[in-house]
Image (tube, rainbow, N blue to C red):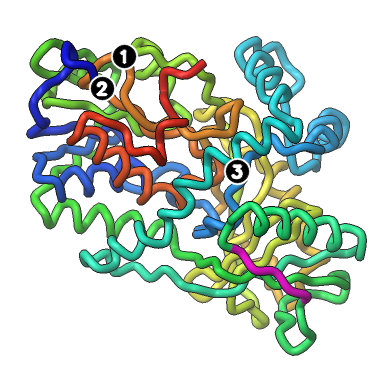
């Protein structure tokens, strides 16, 4: 930071948002000696940090706007069951976002985005290991992922994509699924399989709640049920105003509100759009549950072992973050995956959930200082919030304490256009 903007090391912080990104940032700031308060309109793990698939997959982190994604976009306009859903209605901000998003669906942009993401993905394993070493006991389970296909062509295309990621330096291994390793949960409709090594999974709710508990045990405060309506900054402090009229003041404020980030950060220079890319999930019982995650790339559906059952998640729905769950979208996920699994008790379907993943048009997170030395943003991770959350918290805390962004997050400047 320039000499004119220098300030002493912060002693206190307010983090708005109690998901994995916000709590990771709060925990790391606490480790740096700051007094930290977390504010959330509901509580820890109440949003996208609860119902996601719990994949810790640094080797699979890649931009959503990949080359060839046009086919999913076009399919979404005519097929209500398509993995991607874009509503046909008058919504200028959404269509502006989608035009910018579409401009990144080419090989050159994809390569640039991948290059920018790789430095932070290389810190993922160490960031989870640090939390475990400091008492975050929720397990992160190392397990091979199995990708299943109904055609040889689809399997070959996906294998080529994975091998390309490996060649770029992503920590991933891929091999043909041997019959002896074939999960019993796969039906005969899955005729080709790949095994992906070097990844892990977790129970996202348990992990975030455990992180919240460790934060509180270290003296941190979490204010549940508090909706922040504005953030202001002066020369000596920053202030948040809640909807009940209460004011809280600290040296710095970090906005980690996911898909709602523009509401508070727009005033402070956030120009890049953030759109809610909503995902759906539910839980089912079964007598042939897999030992690790399953992925069906053709259907864009994922399955993860979850509390003795199976969590199934999928779809990308571009709607407002506060709009209600659409049961038709939930059923489209179930319909897509039902023929590919066996031994599942579909009548046990429960925990129906929709959550808003914060998507940016350029595929990069938003991490760093806004247009004030006292206000920071952390979000825009898209589908990778769980895997990148702990690393984000560590790197952003380092910037807040030292005044300089670590090299791993320079490309994620919130003030970029």
- Which residues are drawn in magenta? 172-176
Is 37 in the magenta? no
Is residue 336 shown above or below 417?
Answer: below
Q: CA distance from mark 1 to mark 3?
A: 31 Å
Q: How far across and how far down the image is residue 284, in percent? A: 61, 66
Q: Give neighbour class at mark 1: few <14, some 14-19, many 20+ (Cα, 10 Å).
A: some
Residue 371: give its label: 1
Name the residue tied to disc 3: 279
Q: How far across and how far down the image is residue 218, in percent? A: 11, 54
x 8%, y 26%: residue = 8
Q: Earlier in the sequence, mark 1 or mark 3?
A: 3
Q: How far across and how far down the image is residue 220, in percent? A: 13, 46
- Asked if one can make out residue 50 in the rendered structure from this viewpoint, the answer is yes
80 to the left or right of 235? right
Viewer-closest of 323 and 367: 367
Question: Could you tell me which quadrant the N terminus lies in?
Answer: top left
Viewer-closest of 80 and 217: 217
Tell us which disc is closer to us: 3 or 2: 2
Q: How far across and how far down the image is residue 215, in percent? A: 19, 52
Q: Provide the secondary structure element on which disc 2 rests.
A: strand
């Amino acid at each position: 930071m320039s000499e004119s903007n220098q300030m002493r090391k912060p002693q206190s912080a307010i983090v708005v948002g109690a998901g994995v990104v916000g709590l990771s940032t709060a925990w790391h700031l606490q480790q740096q000696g700051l007094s930290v308060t977390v504010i959330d309109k509901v509580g820890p793990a109440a949003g996208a940090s609860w119902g996601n698939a719990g994949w810790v997959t640094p080797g699979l982190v890649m931009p959503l706007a990949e080359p060839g994604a046009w086919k999913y976009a076009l399919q979404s306009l005519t097929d209500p069951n398509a993995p991607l859903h874009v509503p046909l209605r008058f919504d200028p901000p959404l269509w502006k976002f989608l035009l910018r998003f579409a401009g990144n669906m080419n090989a050159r942009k994809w390569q640039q985005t991948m290059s920018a993401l790789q430095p932070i993905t290389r810190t993922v394993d160490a960031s989870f290991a640090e939390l475990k070493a400091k008492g975050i006991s929720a397990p992160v389970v190392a397990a091979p992922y199995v990708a299943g296909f109904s055609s040889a062509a689809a399997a070959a295309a996906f294998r080529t994509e994975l091998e390309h990621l490996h060649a770029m330096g992503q920590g991933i291994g891929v091999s043909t699924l041997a019959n002896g390793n074939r999960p019993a949960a796969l039906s005969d409709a899955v005729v080709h399989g790949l095994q992906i090594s070097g990844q892990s999974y977790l129970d996202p709710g348990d992990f975030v709640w455990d992180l919240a508990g460790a934060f509180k045990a270290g003296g941190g405060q979490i204010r549940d049920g508090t909706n922040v309506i504005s953030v202001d900054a002066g020369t000596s402090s920053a202030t948040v105003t809640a909807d009940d009229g209460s004011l809280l003041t600290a040296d710095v404020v970090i906005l980690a509100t996911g898909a709602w980030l523009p509401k508070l950060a727009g005033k402070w220079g956030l120009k890049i759009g953030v759109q809610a890319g909503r995902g759906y999930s539910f839980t089912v019982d079964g007598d042939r549950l897999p030992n690790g995650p399953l992925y069906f790339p053709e259907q864009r559906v994922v399955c993860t072992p979850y509390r003795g059952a199976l969590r199934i998640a999928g779809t990308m729905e571009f709607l407002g973050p506060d709009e209600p769950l659409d049961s038709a979208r939930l059923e489209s996920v179930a319909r897509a995956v039902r023929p590919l699994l066996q031994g599942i008790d579909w009548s046990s379907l429960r925990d129906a959930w929709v959550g808003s993943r914060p998507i940016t048009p350029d595929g990069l997170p938003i991490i760093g200082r806004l247009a004030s030395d006292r206000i920071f943003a952390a979000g825009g991770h898209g589908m990778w919030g769980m895997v990148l959350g702990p690393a984000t918290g560590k790197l952003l805390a380092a910037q807040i304490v030292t005044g300089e962004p670590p090299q791993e997050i320079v490309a994620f400047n919130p003030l970029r256009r």
